[in-house]
Amino acid sequence: MSEAEAAGDRPENPPAVPVGGDLVRRHRLPVRLWHWVNAFTIFVMLMSGLMIFNAHPRLYWGHYGANSDHAWLMIGSKGDRGLLVVGDTPYDTTGVLGLWKDPAGREQRRAFPWWATIPSSYSLADARLWHFFFAWVLVIAALGYWMVSLVNRHVQRDLLPRRGELGLRHIWRDIADHARLRFPRGVAALRYNILQKIAYLSVIFGLIPLIILTGLTMSPGVNAAWPWLVDLFGGRQSARSIHFLCAFGFVLFILVHLLMVLLAGPINELRSMITGWYRIPEEREL
């Protein structure tokens, strides 16, 4: 299921007793617009963030960080090799990270390649403009989502795990079903399973607030107004590291999300997110 399903939208005029094969209205127009605006926003923020990272491709813990300080993560090059260094362990990333070729065939020594960044040619100033503008789009969308979802009780009704769902046996059964590609069918396909609930709650009330707060912590102006934020995250460099890890968490969430859409039936899932109509998967015959 897609993240827009987490907006609490319910089918409009569904059949009295919907069954497998029925076409039901799953998403209203505002929800579908919210989904695609957020998808584009995250896409732009990730790519512009990688360009910002290219300006200093090292991550540290604490208050300070410079080339002479020990970085827990570094992307760079040495000789004819691109390198990703995590802790003290180097990994050869030649051609992908640290050392790669641009569309003209010229060798470049930057952390992330041109196809992964906005803009594609190096410009820290332009990347910051893209990143900060869409950061406000993310903040406004998140605030709107939190308020509406709490008021209409979507979070309490649809996302909070019910009694027994957090049991290890229940969670393991859901993991096993997904591993076997056994997805819910019939009306059960309209409800969230425990893995979806955990994933959506983690993103909505974990990753998004954390990535916003750590982003604010890196702003000198915010540091002056709210110095407690720096202390909360253990320093600006720690906030930068957490910010980067949250972005990586978003990438993992998106990849898993897209994989689940493909496996669950991309035509049906995309149709529901574009037109609002969703066909309930028919029950398997025993």
Image (cartoon, rainbow, N blue to C red):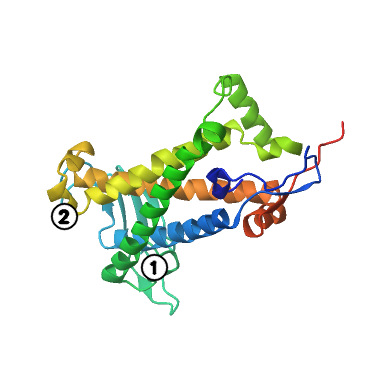
Q: Residue at x 42, y 43 (%)?
A: 147
Q: Which mark is residue 118?
A: 1
In the rendered image, residue 48, in percent from the top left (x then y), is placed at: 36, 63
Hey, which quadrant is residue 93 in on the image?
bottom left
Residue 55 makes an appearance in the image: yes
| 224, 149: nearer the viewer | 149
Residue 70 makes an appearance in the image: no
| 93, 162: nearer the viewer | 162
In the rendered image, residue 213, in percent from the top left (x then y), is placed at: 29, 45
In the rendered image of this protein, does residue 255 appear above or below residue 205?
below
Quarter holding the C terminus?
A: top right
Q: Is disc 1 surrounded by few (<14), some (14 to 19) or many (20+) residues within 10 Å?
A: many
Sequence order check, earlier mark of 1 and 2: 1
In the rendered image, residue 186, in percent from the top left (x then y), is placed at: 76, 38
Task: Give the side of residue 108 with respect to residue 170, left or right.
Answer: left
Q: Which mark is residue 221?
A: 2
| 164, 16: nearer the viewer | 16
Q: Secondary structure at mark 1?
A: loop
Task: Give the side of residue 239 with respect to residue 38, left or right.
Answer: left
Q: Secondary structure at mark 2?
A: helix
| 11, 162: nearer the viewer | 11
Q: Is disc 2 surrounded by few (<14), some (14 to 19) or many (20+) residues within 10 Å?
A: few
Residue ranking furthest to the left: 224
Task: Give the side of residue 116 with respect to residue 18, left or right.
Answer: left
Q: Amino acid at mark 1?
A: Ile
